[in-house]
Amino acid sequence: MNPLQNADLHCHSTVSDGTLSPEDLAARASGNGVELWALTDHDEISGQHRAAAAAKTHGMRYLTGTEISVTFIGQTVHIVGLGFDADDIQLREGLRRTRGGREERAMEMSAGLAKVGIQGAYEGALKFVGNPELISRTHFARFLVESGVCKETNEVFRKYLTEGKPGFVPHRWASLKDAVGWITGAGGMAIIAHPARYKFTPNEEFALFTEFKALGGQGVEVVTGSHTVSEYATYADTAREFGLAASRGSDFHSPDESHTELGTLPFLPANLTPVWDVLASRIQ
Ligand code: AMP
Ligand code: MN
Ligand code: MN
Ligand code: MN
């Protein structure tokens, strides 16, 4: 296989905070020419068997996937897992615990929003939730757009749902060690998602990559819907510097909200090892 392949290894369904079912996502990915696909719901793998079956009907190759929420030096970092055994007990149990605090966090978010005059946000967000164990900020954002408080979800995050804003509730997610351990323990590869999104100092970012690598992490997203073209080059260098394989994924959530469509990003830069080369034996 080679870097010039239409692999889309990062997207979300109704099993987490996407608006399409795994089956509809598979159809859309295939329609856009995706050859190798992975569904990576936040802290969830219950859509994996459906996604793999749907990929098969469209003639796409498939890698199992997830995106685990981790707390590292006070920030939320996302770790994508690919090519694991979706029936692995430790992974399933670890993800179940990671999902555990979301309900309470959502109630606190709602209380924070009520203080600035936005009533009923918890109930409102729930209408958009596809999986009762996975209420996320995205569902609150959809409610605030629907109720006319903001024009689009990006604006909701900026005004209400990010650090220091009324609907933001700090949360402790999984540790980096646990997330990488669950993924690799289930036979998969751990990958740092969209590294340019974090607000780390250069030293903190170095610590993230160093610790991740030491824990058995093997990949980094280089071409993602969250990166600019110049960030592709920055993290291609980081991948080479740390000896990490490179991944590519749109992070597609919804036809109405996502600015990056499934399977439409540029190919990986040359001189990188694609994650799908390392994971060749795990492709279904
Ligand atoms: P949570 O896991 O509940 O903290 O929600 C995180 C999710 O919110 C991410 O996976 C994104 O889908 C979404 N998100 C975060 N920041 C933004 C933003 N600025 N604009 C739109 N969506 C965002
Ligand atoms: Mn999301
Ligand atoms: Mn993410
Ligand atoms: Mn994502």
Image: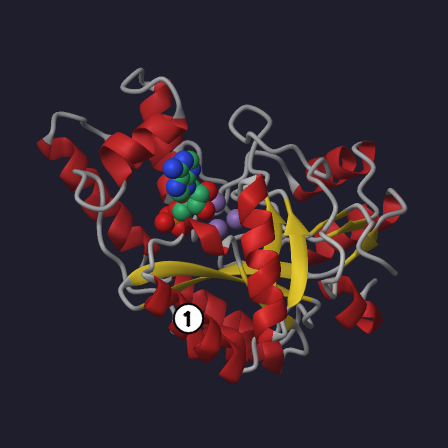
Task: Where is residue 143? Give x, y as percent.
Answer: 35, 27
Location of residue 19 with respect to 276 vertically, above or below: above
Task: Where is residue 177? Give x, y as percent.
Answer: 44, 79
Location of residue 268 with respect to 142 vertically, above or below: below
How did the renderer colour the structure? secondary structure
Location of residue 176 with respect to 141 vertically, above or below: below
- Asked if residue 188 lies left or right of residue 134, the reply is right
Asked whether residue 219 appears in the rendered view, the answer is no
Going 41% across and 60% down the picture, which residue do you hit? Answer: 77
Q: Quadrant of residue 18?
A: top right
- Asked if residue 162 lies left or right of residue 184, the reply is left
- Asked if residue 159 lies left or right of residue 31, the reply is left
Q: Quadrant of residue 184?
A: bottom right
How many neighbours does mark 1 have within 10 angstroms: few (below 14), some (14-19), or many (20 or more)? some
Q: Residue furthest left?
A: 115
Please name the residue that numbered disc 1 is placed on. Answer: 206
Task: Where is residue 187? Give x, y as percent.
Answer: 68, 78
The kind of residue on which mark 1 rests is Phe
Number of numbered discs overlaid on the protein picture: 1
Quarter holding the C terminus? Answer: bottom right
- Asked if residue 90 lies left or right of residue 8, the reply is left
Going 21% across and 39% down the picture, which residue do you hit? Answer: 167
Which SS class for mark 1?
A: helix
Q: Quadrant of residue 170?
A: bottom left
Location of residue 251 with respect to 42 vertically, above or below: above
Quarter holding the N terminus? Answer: bottom right
Going 38% across and 30% down the picture, which residue do you hit? Answer: 154
Asked whether residue 25 appears in the rendered view, the answer is yes
